[in-house]
Image (cartoon, helix red, strand yellow):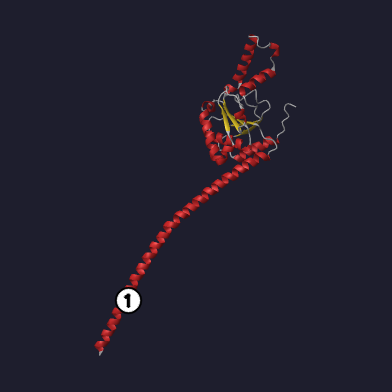
């Protein structure tokens, strides 16, 4: 009798052991399939999530640039008085093309028509193409798709004249050197003397207005209304001595890392100043 009981118990234990093995195998298979499923889902969702984040970042960046451009235009319209011609006078030894390009683009964005860039060594003039390339690069970076709304014309030398195409441009940029200062006055005086010698002019007809007219014909751009001087040197270093009689000068410590807020604060100072023009 006991032998039958032992056999019965043994069979039950054997059945339970078999059932345990079956359950363990089933759970392993389900767990493996679940891990595969999780990996598959992760493989699909992670790139989407990253793409969404990148798109969000790009969209946010593009949105900020767009708002920034709108604000720049509004800044220009908010001023009571905006200079027609801004001169950038750098009296520092080290020149940074990107910082100067930023200033030029900001001038374009607020509606300034003429920008001249001057340094005492004439480096911008000799490296005119590099400066213009940097301006175009920063124009694309700062204005984006709106850069097409701000066409720019570059004047390289005195032989160039403003035609109807240039006059339709949003901004005209010219790199100047000391040769455009006192030497230009000397050349104009020599030209007048030569005209008198050849009896093309009479000496009594030569006056300040005649010289002024000749100098303006050679410069092709209006006198600077505002000159931003960058650097600690208290001198204009030969910057257009004839054309700055009525210009407003505002000094900044350096042209490096100038923010748009700094630039706009200068425009507000100019807008608020009263120009008596010798009165």
Q: Among all residues in the image, which is located at the extreme bottom? A: 1
Q: Quadrant of the C terminus?
A: top right
On the question of residue 234 being in view, the answer is no
Q: At which x and y percent is residue 110? A: 63, 37
Quarter of the rendering containing residue 69: top right
Q: Among all residues in the image, which is located at the extreme left? A: 3
Q: Among all residues in the image, which is located at the extreme front? A: 164
In the image, what residue occupies the spot 58% across and 33% down?
152
- Report whether 34 appears left or right of 111: left
Q: At which x and y percent is residue 187? A: 60, 17
In the image, what residue occupies the spot 55% across and 49% down?
60
Q: Residues within 10 Å of mark 1 (few under 14, many from 20)?
A: few
Q: At which x and y percent is residue 211? A: 66, 18
Q: Quadrant of the N terminus?
A: bottom left
Residue holding disc 1:
19
Q: Is residue 161 above or below residue 265?
A: above
Q: Is residue 133 above or below residue 191?
A: below
Name the secondary structure under disc 1: helix
On the question of residue 2 being in view, the answer is yes
In the image, 155 versus 242, the foreground residue is 155
Q: At which x and y percent is residue 135? A: 54, 34
Q: Is residue 2 above or below residue 79?
A: below
In the image, 231 versus 140, the foreground residue is 140
Quarter of the rendering containing residue 90: top right
């Amino acid at each position: 009798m006991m032998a039958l009981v032992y056999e019965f118990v043994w069979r039950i234990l054997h059945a339970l052991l078999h059932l345990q093995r079956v359950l363990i195998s089933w759970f392993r298979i389900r767990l493996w399939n679940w891990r595969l499923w999780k990996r598959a889902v992760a493989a699909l969702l992670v790139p989407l999530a990253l793409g969404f984040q990148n798109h969000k970042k790009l969209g946010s960046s593009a949105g900020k640039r767009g708002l920034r451009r709108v604000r720049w235009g509004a800044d220009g319209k908010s001023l009571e008085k905006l200079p027609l011609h801004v001169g950038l006078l750098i009296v520092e030894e080290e020149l940074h093309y990107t910082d100067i390009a930023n200033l030029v683009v900001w001038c374009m964005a607020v509606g300034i028509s003429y920008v001249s860039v001057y340094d005492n060594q004439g480096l911008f003039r000799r490296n005119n193409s590099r400066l213009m390339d940097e301006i175009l690069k920063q124009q694309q970076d700062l204005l984006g798709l709106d850069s097409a709304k701000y066409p720019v014309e570059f004047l390289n030398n005195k032989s160039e004249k403003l035609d109807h195409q240039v006059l339709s441009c949003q901004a005209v940029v010219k790199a100047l050197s000391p040769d455009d200062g006192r030497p230009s006055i000397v050349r104009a005086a020599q030209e007048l003397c030569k005209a008198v010698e050849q009896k093309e002019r009479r000496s009594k007809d030569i006056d300040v207005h005649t010289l002024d007219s000749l100098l303006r014909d050679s410069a092709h751009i209006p006198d600077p209304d505002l000159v931003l001087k960058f650097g600690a040197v208290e001198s204009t270093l030969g910057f257009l001595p004839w054309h700055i009689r009525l210009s407003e000068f505002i000094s900044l410590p350096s042209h490096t890392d100038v923010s748009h807020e700094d630039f706009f604060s200068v425009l507000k100072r100019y807008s608020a100043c009263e120009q008596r023009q010798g009165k």
